[in-house]
Image (tube, helix red, strand yellow):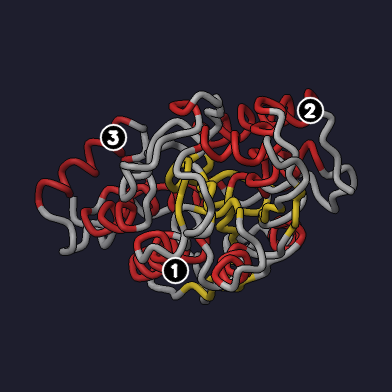
Amino acid sequence: MNHPLLSAALSDRSRRDALRLLAALGLGSVLRPANAATWPSRPIRLVVPASAGSGPDLFARPLAEVIGRKLGQSFVIDNKPGATGIIGNDIVAKASPDGQTLLFTYAATVVINQTLQPKMPYDGLRDLLPVAQVGAGGNFLVVVPEFPARSLKEFVAHVRARPDVYDYASWGIGSGGHLTMEALRMQSGIRIRHVPYKTVPQILNDMQGGIVKVGWVDTSSSLPLIRAGKLRALAISGTRRGSATPDVPTMTEQGYPFDTNSWYGLFAPAGTPDAIVRRLNAEVNLALASADMRERFVQMNMADPPIKTPEAFAQTVRDDVAAWGNVIRTNHITVD
């Protein structure tokens, strides 16, 4: 089969593997001309509900570049940080369902907000259509180099002996970092104050300046500082260690179970034609199967990306809404 999706950047073996994968998922026909033959008719707006330089942004840009070449239209990245993703997600939820406005976001903006935020301007399960999952992994608990702990158990012991002395940063009330620390707090009995920030880069800047000594951050944008010794990662949430940081154990491995993974994902407004959704899913999955993108995942410290149909990704979203909702309700977590 000759198709612009199968670019020269893919080796013959990668090309064959990708085609077999799409056939197994029932997506082989998506590579043929879609019913929405006129799409895309102009550059595609890709809303990222996080700041430039953040983890979602660092994945969205190279992926958009690859897919844009295959579609024959560029992607325009529109960073809309704030309100734990609600601002950016709302733009896409209310956009015209024509495939010209898409969302590249992280799990918490969809699955956590669905339970935690009582007055969202949209319904994440009803108004946002899952297209493709991009990666899976966790978040880092990081401390400044002078912090007297080199493991999660040492951190818990140190903070528990000094109740209400330390603050910790996350990227907002109800963020994955906030709820993960709440889960750790419930298990360990530590008392530590939450300082919500707007973005992860702001946390990283303030930690370097000594303004805050503890923080939850994504495993991608924090990686250069960890490698340079300017921050120390004590633990990673989720089920797997980071591919670029195999020496950082999971929370579960250190005695504090927390096995809910984070992910990035591509979404479209509800009502987007199925032909467009499946074409996008096929493009994303082919890009993820390439050696270049797999290497980027290693560089960005994410696990091998799962290859899923839109339906399988939608099921992941529903399962995670239930799991996070249980954490929120069990621990009586509310927004201030």
User: Percent position (x, y) of residue 165?
Assistant: 74, 49
Disc 1 marks which amino acid? Arg
The residue pinned by badge 3 equals 23
Q: Residues within 10 Å of mark 3 (few under 14, many from 20)?
A: few
Q: Which mark is residue 61?
A: 1
Residue situated in front as seen by the camera: 278 or 290: 290
Closer to us: mark 2 or mark 3? Answer: 2
Real-space Cα separation, disc 1 to disc 2, in angstroms: 36 Å
Residue situated in front as seen by the camera: 158 or 42: 158
Disc 2 marks which amino acid? Asn
Which of the two labelled residues, at mark 1 and mark 2, occupies the earlier sequence position? 1
Kindly state the secondary structure of the residue where label 3 is placed. Answer: helix
Query: Residue at left 39%, top 52%?
Result: 284
Which of the two labelled residues, at mark 2 and mark 3, occupies the earlier sequence position? 3
Query: Residue at left 47%, top 59%?
Result: 145
Kindly state the secondary structure of the residue where label 2 is placed. Answer: loop
Q: Residues within 10 Å of mark 1 (few under 14, many from 20)?
A: some
User: Percent position (x, y) of residue 211?
Assistant: 66, 68
Which of the two labelled residues, at mark 1 and mark 3, occupies the earlier sequence position? 3
Closer to us: mark 1 or mark 3? Answer: 1
The residue pinned by badge 2 equals 331
Disc 3 marks which amino acid? Ala
Residue situated in front as seen by the camera: 185 or 316: 185
The number of numbered badges drawn on the structure is 3
Relative to residue 132, is residue 163 drawn left or right?
right
Real-space Cα separation, disc 2 to disc 3, in angstroms: 44 Å
